[in-house]
C-alpha cells in the first residue's frame, strides 16, 4: 500500500473535526471503553461510505443537493437529540445531599457503538471527502477502480482506528488522572456534553 496514502490518512484523522472531537470528549468524560466503542462505530460507518464510492452511489449523493441536505440535517438532528438527552439527564436523579445529578446508563458496547455508526452514516461530508481524496491515490493501471477504492477505504479505516485508539487512550488517562468520572454525572458536565453535541451538529449542518 502506498505509504504516502497511509501518512496522509493519519494526518487527516488527526485534524480537528467532529469525529475526533467526539471521540476525545467521550474518552475524557466516559473513559477508554466507551470512547473505543464509539470509535469502532465511526470506523464501521466508513465501510458504508467506501462501498458507496466504489458503487457510484456517492456520486449520486454529491450531485443531489436535496439528498445531501436530507442526510446532513438528519445527522445534525441526531446530535441535537443527543445533546438534549445529556442536558435532561443532568437533572435526573437526586443525591443524598439533595442535589440532582445525571444517571448515565451502565456501560454498553452496543449503545456507544451504535452512536458512532449513526453519527458517521448521517454525515454525507464523508462521502464528499472520499470522492475528492481517493482518486489521487488510485493507480492508473489499476485493473478495477472499484476494488482500488475498497482497498483505499479499508486502509483509511485501519489508520483512522489506530489514531482514534491513541486518542481514546489519552482521554482515558486524563479521565483516570484527574478523576473526571466522578464529576461526569453532574449538572454542569451534562450541560457541557450537550453543548459539545450541539456544536458538532452545527459543524455538520453549516460548515
Image: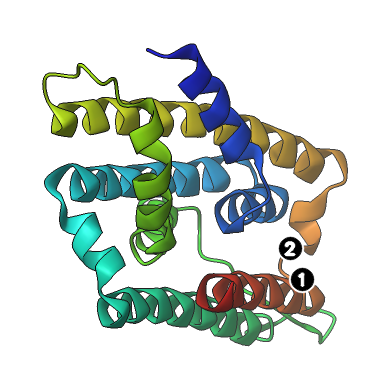
Marks 1 and 2 sit apart, C-alpha to C-alpha, by: 6 Å
Res. 184 mark: 2
Res. 189 mark: 1
Judged left or right of residue 204, residue 186 is right
- Colour setting: rainbow
Q: Position of residue 116 (x, y in %)?
A: 43, 55
Q: Residue at x 52, y 40 (%)?
A: 36
Dot 2 alpha-carbon crowd within 10 angstroms: few under 14, some 14 to 19, many 20 or more: many
Q: Under tag 1, what secondary structure?
A: helix
Count the labels in the image. Answer: 2
Residue 89 lies, with reference to residue 147, above or below; the image says below
Q: Position of residue 137 (x, y in %)?
A: 38, 26
Judged left or right of residue 126, residue 167 is right
| Residue 41 seen in the current view | no
Q: Residue at x 71, y 68 (%)?
A: 185
Q: Nearer the viewer, residue 186 or 42?
A: 42
Residue 55 lies, with reference to residue 159, above or below; the image says below
Q: Nearer the viewer, residue 64 or 192?
A: 64
Q: In the picture, which quadrant includes the C terminus?
A: bottom right
Q: Residue at x 44, y 55 (%)?
A: 112
Q: Under tag 2, what secondary structure?
A: loop
Judged left or right of residue 106, residue 115 is left
As drawn, which residue projects farthest toward the front?
140
Q: In the picture, which quadrant includes the N terminus?
A: top left
- First in sequence: mark 1 vs mark 2: 2
Q: Residue at x 33, y 28 (%)?
A: 152
Judged left or right of residue 80, residue 44 is left
Q: Nearer the viewer, residue 36 or 164?
A: 164
Determine whether label 1 and label 2 are within 8 Å by CB. yes
Residue 103 lies, with reference to residue 171, above or below; the image says below
Which corner quadrant of the image does residue 87 belong to? bottom right
Amino acid at each position: 500500500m502506498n505509504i504516502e496514502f497511509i501518512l496522509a490518512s493519519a494526518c487527516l484523522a488527526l485534524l480537528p473535526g467532529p469525529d475526533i472531537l467526539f471521540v476525545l470528549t467521550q474518552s475524557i468524560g466516559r473513559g477508554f471503553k466507551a470512547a473505543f466503542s464509539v470509535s469502532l462505530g465511526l470506523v464501521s460507518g466508513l465501510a458504508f461510505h467506501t462501498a458507496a464510492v466504489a458503487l457510484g452511489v456517492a456520486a449520486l449523493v454529491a450531485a443531489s443537493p436535496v439528498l445531501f441536505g436530507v442526510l446532513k440535517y438528519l445527522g445534525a438532528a441526531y446530535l441535537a437529540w443527543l445533546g438534549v438527552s445529556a442536558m435532561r439527564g443532568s437533572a435526573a436523579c437526586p443525591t443524598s445531599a439533595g442535589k440532582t445529578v445525571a444517571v448515565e446508563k451502565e456501560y454498553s458496547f452496543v449503545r456507544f457503538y451504535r452512536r458512532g455508526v449513526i453519527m458517521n452514516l448521517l454525515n454525507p461530508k464523508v462521502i464528499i471527502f472520499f470522492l475528492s481524496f481517493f482518486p489521487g491515490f488510485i493507480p492508473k493501471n489499476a485493473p478495477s477502480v472499484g476494488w482500488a477504492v475498497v482497498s483505499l477505504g479499508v486502509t483509511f479505516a485501519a489508520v483512522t482506528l489506530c489514531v482514534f485508539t491513541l486518542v481514546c487512550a489519552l482521554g482515558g488517562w486524563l479521565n483516570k488522572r484527574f478523576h473526571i468520572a466522578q464529576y461526569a454525572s453532574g449538572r454542569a458536565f451534562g450541560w457541557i456534553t450537550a453543548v459539545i453535541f450541539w456544536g458538532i451538529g452545527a459543524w455538520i449542518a453549516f460548515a
